[in-house]
Image (cartoon, rainbow, N blue to C red):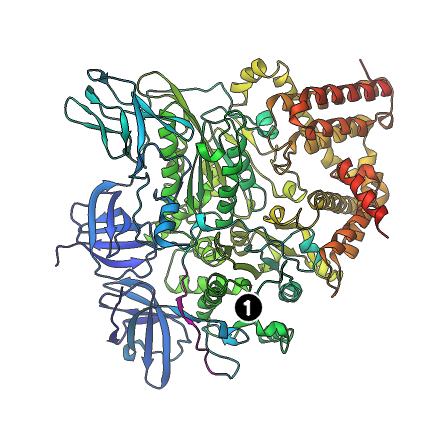
Amino acid sequence: MIHPARTYLGAAGAAGPLLFLEGTRRAVLGEVATVRCAGAPPRRGQVIEAGEDLTVVQVLEETIGLGPEAARVTLTGDPAAGTVGPDLLGRVLSGAGAPLDGLPAPVGAGRRPLQGAPMNPVRRRKPADFIETGISAIDGLNTLVRGQKLPIFSGSGLPGLALAARVVAGARTPRGEPFAVVFVGIGVTQRETDEFLRGFAGTEAMARSVFYLNRTADPTIERILAPRFALTQAEYLAFERGMHVLVVMADLTQYCEALREIGAAREEIPGRRGYPGYLYTDLATLFERAGVLRDGTGSVTQLPILTMPDDDITHPIPDLTGYITEGQIVLSREMHRQVVDPPVDVLPSLSRLMSAGIGAQTSPAHRRWADQLYASYAQGRDARATAAIVGEAGLPPEDRRALAFADRFEREFIHQGPARRTIAETLEQGWRLLESLPREDLRRIPDATWAERRTAREAAP
Amino acid sequence: MTDIPRVVRIAGALTEVAPLPGAALHEIVRVGDRGLLGEVIRVRGQTATVQVFEETIGLALEEPVRVTGAPLEVDLGPGLLGSVLDGIGRPLERLAALQGDFLAAGADAPTLDPDRRWPFTPSLQAGADVGPGDVLGTVPDRNGEHRILVPPGVSGRLAELKAGDWTVLDPVGRLEDGTELRLAHRWPVRVPRPVAAWRTGARPFVTGQRVFDFLFPVAEGGSVAVPGGFGTGKTVIEQSLAKYAEADIVVYVGCGERGNEMADVLTEFPELVDPRTGRTLMDRAVLVVNTSNMPVAAREASVYLGLTIAEYYRDQGFRVALMADSLSRWAEALREIGSRLREMPGEEGYPTGLGSRLGKMCERAGRALVPGRPEREGAVTFISALSPPGGDLSEPVTQAAGRVVAALWALDAGLAHQRQFPAVDWETSWSLQAEGVAPWFAQHVGEDWPALRREVLTLLQRDRELREVAGLVGPDALEDADRLVLESARLARECLLGQSAYDAADASSPLAKTRAMAALLVRMLEGGRAALAAGRELGALDLTRARRALVALRDGPPAQFEETVAAARAEVEASLRQAGGAT
């Protein structure tokens, strides 16, 4: 459908990031608008509600000094779209796709609608390819696979972004296929983005990465679009160019706050904690863009990062995210304080697609091994809580052993510092810890698995 | 120009259309140049509010709207089994053939393949008097045979009924009054299909999951809510039920859930072969899929579509299991639409009618004498997952569901963190039908079943109390009898109630196995008590040995079940004798 451009002189009103137009003809939901005001560069916007009596335009740039009466608003008829192409790799762009690295705007291979289209579920392939990140807490216990969306639940002051940077730096594709990284910063501070970028500057990794940066000081509304620019480019690389794309999105909490701000400006009836009732649906339009096509070669894997307000995992943002994503990596303030690096609390962490990625690709005993580590650690954590009341001496022997295990597990398995561990090293590390317990405590390890482990160990030099 | 109905407002999934005089609620309209499917949900004067089942981005004001005069309907007939439909009944494979890997708005695709021919064998002859639900004949389908029914509301004398290869659109017969009969008929999804009489079920819905069959059983035709926070394993449970529960037909509604999960279902269902029939699960399943990024109004409709298909197979005389994952997403879709309508919200922004709509939905489940001859019964068992925010069961959707379902299987994040799966919290879970189906278990599985169940429930209750005490004074301060309870309860949790969906030997537990494990556990507990009463110490009881026996029974190959039970029993008896507890 081609819609001609129409220009209107004067808007009926403005509120926050929104501009209200009266008497628009044939306004199209989602079309791009240009708002011109004397003495200011043109601002871009998008129709988010169309009505013969009232049409609502969401303005992307700051609306300070925008006088609705004198504004000239052009409805372009074009859907919101982003430039995509292989030449975007190696570039640093704004949250709206404009160059930030001093180079000319990328030419690209074409433009694609930012909205994206849902993948037909029957054309999806079940994600099953193991990605080795080099981090034991992930590879061993919360395995990441291609096409998965696995968020990091961070807290303010916790190293969520640093963990994502390590995953990006350490990730190995199984067969060395073409690989790209798309990073989108959403309302992230200058300091954090600089730190993240520094890890890339001048490396080979930079050449296969593209950065979209909406910083804390940038317009709020741009935060809504920035991840969509990034995902549109990621889908292009994955499904038109056959690449394996890892998308890092930080910080989703800022994204949700931008949504709430627009909802309030539209005077919508809010849902939980003032967030719009459609927050779940909206987040799903981002997260569900991860996946693998049945007949394609590429994939989009997502590593979103969010800050749990007040470390509360039941807050609507982590809660709704957890219902859409395929698991979560939860960071713990307490472990961070005890200098466990990375401070991953594996008990509430989960990878739903783990079972498909382990076994043949890692070790046949991986599932049992992981179940046992979880069970022993969970028992140790319980014992730690009991010991706080009755003292360690009041614990039965098995609980005492589990408590000692839990301490070592945190210090020697979860904590690994800057070192990268292969999956074989991760598994070995876990086995060694398990072997510090007597056989009868290892109830999740069947005799056959145990015997195999003994044989393998004796065969090793 | 002015009297053609046109779009006058577009806000998300809602559009306003004017002028639309005489519009009826729930009437289907085609919106805009692409003919997007929409449903009238409010009428004010000449203006109708329409919820659109497809993406509205790109829709423009003034685009024309076409009235159809019909409500949202689905074609019911042969060829449904094995298909994957979107929330409004379009086969996703056909959409993929039309549009490629990604979905776009505005496509038309009939639910049933209009070209496929089915060999029809009539079972009635001209001159017969027929009424609603009468079986006219059969066609072979993936599940065996598909019974062709006289549609509800149709009756008369058969003038003609023809054997032959027919498409679902061909008339295969005619009544004397001229009414044509076809292999398929249409039915409005929001209207329950009529039954002759509801029946109370004394027969359980056998799930193959020990914690449900043993502790919280429901009757066939019951409705169950399965609330659980994220990561508590709702989806794995729904899928295990679809795979292993005793049902002739499975209807699986993925309502606002993950695309990758549906890919998982689509990979696994066709591979899962039922050893009794040699057919795959896909041969007796219909999937309705509306992932969370697909249009929100279609999400609301998807559950009704699933219910209607389930009722249609019930009417053929089958036992149908309907899974919905998750009803919370359905409720949220209602809320989203309600808030766009600027309706006065009830609790937490949900529409005030949430409870009554949920109630009406659950009332469509049940065991029934279905209309028509030959006389037959069918059942729809309705299992719906719920996704309470923050895992908090006091939220409105879980509360509303709790008032209308027959059983609540509550999942707990704490148990999931300990990797206790299925993470069913036996404190908050309940079943209103456990007593009703107890006689069936006693008769078909073992007379001691109800007693074993009571014993294990008491054990778990006592364990909960003791653990609270132990948390204060330390487990070492407890008496031996109490520590025996703690140890036995741990075994009950780990072996009897815990069951790994990924373990081929234990993913589904036959009732005989469930009973054998429970009996062994209770025997161990009673024998232990006797030993303690006889003055022995807890340390003298070799609980590890009993534990190994239970584990061997749990993980043993199903083919050698009898031998494994005998061996496990001998082990437990031996360990009790050794402790001097045998009585």
Count of numbered badges drawn on the protein? 1
> Percent position (x, y) of residue A88?
50, 74
- Can residue A13 be spotted in the picture? yes
Report the side of A150 relative to B78 (left or right): right
Identify which residue, B275 or A56, lies in the foreground: B275
Residue displayed at 80% across by 52% down: A407
Amino acid type for the residue under numbered disc 1 = Phe
Please tell me whether residue B147 is drawn above or below residue A211 in the rendered image: above
- Judged left or right of residue B143, residue A397 is right
Q: Viewer-proximal residue, A381 or B283?
A: B283
Badge 1: chain ID = A
Percent position (x, y) of residue B354? 39, 41
Q: Nearer the viewer, residue A324 or A266?
A: A324
Q: Furthest-bottom residue in view?
A: A39
Give percent across and percent down for residue A275.
46, 57
Query: In the image, what residue occupies the spot 23% across and 65% down?
Result: A26
Reply above or below: B368 against B329. Answer: above
Is A187 placed left or right of A159 in the picture?
left
Residue highlighted by disc 1: A183
Percent of width and height locating residue B558: 65, 26
Q: In terms of secondary structure, what is the magenta stretch mainly?
A: loop
| Part of the protein shown in magenta | A104-116
Can residue B322 be seen here? The reply is no
Task: For the C terminus of chain B, give its image quadrant.
Answer: top right
